[in-house]
Image: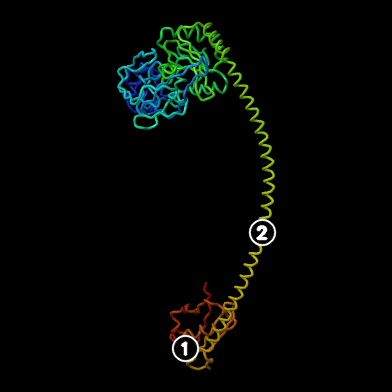
Amino acid sequence: MAQGFADNDDKIAHFQAVTGLQDSNLCAQILQNFNWDLDLAVGYIADGNMDEHGLFAATDSSDQSLSSAGPSSSHIDSVGDVDSEQTPLIPSARNHVIVPQQAGPGLIWRVATLPFSVIRGSYNVMYGAVGLGMWIAGSVLSHSLGALGLGVQQHVNHRGEGANPLLPTSVGAGEAFNFVRSFEREYGTFHPAFETMSFMDALRRAKLQYKFLFVYLHSPDHENTPLFVEQTLCSELVVQFLNEHFIIWGGNIRSTEGYKMSNSLKASTFPFCAVVIASSNQQVSLLQQLEGQKSAADLISALQRLLDEQGASLVAARIEEEEREMNRRLRDEQDAAYQASLQADQERERQRREEEQRLAAEKAEAERKQREEEEAARRAAQKAAEKQKALEKRRQQKILALGPEPEKGPDVTEVLIRFPNGERKGRRFFCNSTLASIYDYVDSLPDFNAGNYKLVSNFPRIVYTSDKLGMTLKDAGLHPRASLYIQIEED
């Protein structure tokens, strides 16, 4: 990828396009630290190690203390926590992560410049950044493996806030993956089966599989490293032996977790290997450490002695766990059978109660509906009787108000009324009688019970509404004779 670009500006532009990082200065710094190798720089970003702002963040993890597991075990010290202000971390070209001096858990570094060099610490394993404009807050060392996330103790930073004791699992896994990729790029693909996961996850896997965890700390700049890797660590006998008997975790001491492990295991020289185990009391024990150049035969011999001396405890633990698991399964099967029988009895009782409740509810509902129907019928009959009584009373009042029908004469108007059923009825009225008298006549008829209606003339069509009831028949144009029909209105 690095070829085909005229100058560094083209590489910066391409790096920005691929990664989505907007800060051209930050992109230039990253590329410069990778010796302008686009493959390495883009690969680092693709592994999820930085976001679009150049940030490398850590989340909370729990501590775990260490104690002696036996005569051959020892405590493991750890790097303490520092402040977790959010600042960018710039990768290096060798192992993809620059570990600042006294880097601690929950730390996010802000890097202003990028010249990279190596600082040898008290154990010759502390690597840092020289000339880095670095902003680090917090303390430098603690004295438990809590910084490796092996317990529940929570450190507190200078603000009184809980500080993260270890990089999150995803970050540790990313560093492990980068280590394996870098290792294979330099030494080939035939090597022990390094776990591409954090140290804690590898430790958990070893515990679940009843194996010891073999730890290899890789110092890329040590003069004995190439010889040890090529002739010892990656020899066929060692690879087969390690893969068969151990869970294997490797870390570059320039990576954050590899650096922490080098301090926790007190690595004083390289090559460095160790064997650890997670104890049953949630502690981690160092069983053996091998420092300096070793032949394949010497390494296998030392590890075989460890297996002979300490392996019986793993076998006993496995047998004990299998017995516990068998007893647990037996109890679970017995409990399951009892629960199934109990649930069957409870289900039958529930169904019986539900059936009784259903029958009682149906009976109560039927009785309620019957009462409602009877009450509705009673109210309807009462309402009909009251309505009929009111109509009869109104008829009598209308008949009295009409008075006797006048005889034919010049002042008498004959009115013919057509009912909705087609029936016609006529009556004579004095011409000075009002339209209300015609309505009174219609209301007085015993076979007409419409409550809301209008009188309408055909030619011309006129609706005689309530505002015209005071007009005389003569003024309304109905004298000497008129024909009207009844128009029923909606209630």
Query: Is 312 displayed left or right of 286 in the figure?
Result: right
Secondary structure of the residue carrying tag 2 is helix
Sequence-first tag of 2 and 1: 2
The residue tagged 1 is 433
The residue tagged 2 is 362
Secondary structure of the residue carrying tag 1 is loop
Kindly identify the residue that appears in the image at 55 percent across and 84 percent down: 393
How far is disc 2 from disc 1 in space, using C-alphas? 64 Å
Whether residue 131 appears in this view of the structure is yes
How has the structure been colored for display? rainbow
Q: Identify the residue at the far front of this view.
A: 71
Inspect the image, locate mark 1, and give the three-letter code of the amino acid beneath it.
Answer: Ser
Front-most of residues 246 and 51: 246
Position of 214 relative to 351 (above/below): above
Circle nearer the viewer, 2 or 1: 2
Query: Is 422 displayed left or right of 158 in the figure?
Result: right
Front-most of residues 129 and 389: 129
Q: Position of residue 198 (x, y in %)?
A: 47, 22
Position of 424 relative to 378 (above/below): below
